[in-house]
Image (spheres, rainbow, N blue to C red):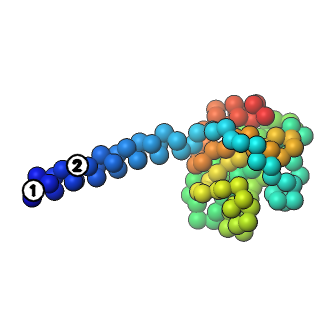
Amino acid sequence: MIISNSIFLFFVLAVSLIIGISWRINIGRVKSRDRLLILESEIGDELGELGTVVVFTTTFCSGCRTTKAIVKDVVKDFKGIFYVEIDAESNLELVRKIDIRSTPTTIFLDSKGFEIARVKGAPKRDQLIKAIKAI
């Protein structure tokens, strides 16, 4: 009985470790996406000449404040790239349409409104710059 409890505990710890490592690897990374179209009317603002960076936030999200500050700071250095902030709680229909599962989530749109990449969690500055240049 003691051996089976030890094996079960070891198994639970191993699975938890694998899930934790996987989560840490994937959070905050820019990932390419399928060409989902997001309209100006859905984001409530116009699209940039070259592209738009959309950040989905919530009021209770601690990482959202950091993300908003970093994205605003990076976007101001790029002409033709607009920044749009969307409260996920107030826009549930759009959240469902584009499959936002956590906040902050940053989405990169081309000039026509097609999603080209997204980041779940707080993005890193160098990855933001690279993703914006790829628009």
Indicate left or right for 113 with 64 as reference.
Answer: right
Disc 2 marks which amino acid? Answer: Phe
Disc 1 marks which amino acid? Answer: Ile
Above or below, comparing residue 133 to residue 20 in the picture? above
User: Which label is found at residue 10?
Assistant: 2
Q: Quadrant of the N terminus?
A: bottom left
Percent position of residue 53, x then y: 76, 45
Report which quarter residue 133 is drawn in.
top right
The local secondary structure at tag 1 comes to: helix
Regarding residue 9, the answer to whether it shows in the image is yes
Classify 10 Å Cα crowding around label 1: few (below 14), some (14-19), many (20 and above).
few
Q: Quadrant of the C terminus?
A: top right
User: Which label is found at residue 66?
Assistant: none
Residue sitting at x 76%, y 43%: 35
User: Which label is found at residue 2?
Assistant: 1
Q: Residue furthest bottom?
A: 90
Residue in front for this viewpoint, 77 or 100: 100
Residue sitting at x 66%, y 56%: 99
Percent position of residue 92, x then y: 70, 67
Residue sitting at x 75%, y 35%: 132
Classify 10 Å Cα crowding around label 2: few (below 14), some (14-19), many (20 and above).
few
Q: Earlier in the sequence, mark 2 or mark 1?
A: 1
Percent position of residue 47, x then y: 87, 48
Indicate left or right for 113 with 19 as reference.
Answer: right
Residue in front for this viewpoint, 125 or 106: 106
Q: How many marks?
A: 2
Regarding residue 83, the answer to whether it shows in the image is no
Alpha-carbon span between mark 2 and mark 1: 12 Å
Residue in front for this viewpoint, 77 or 31: 31
Residue sitting at x 57%, y 53%: 63
Report which quarter residue 88 is drawn in.
bottom right
The local secondary structure at tag 2 comes to: helix
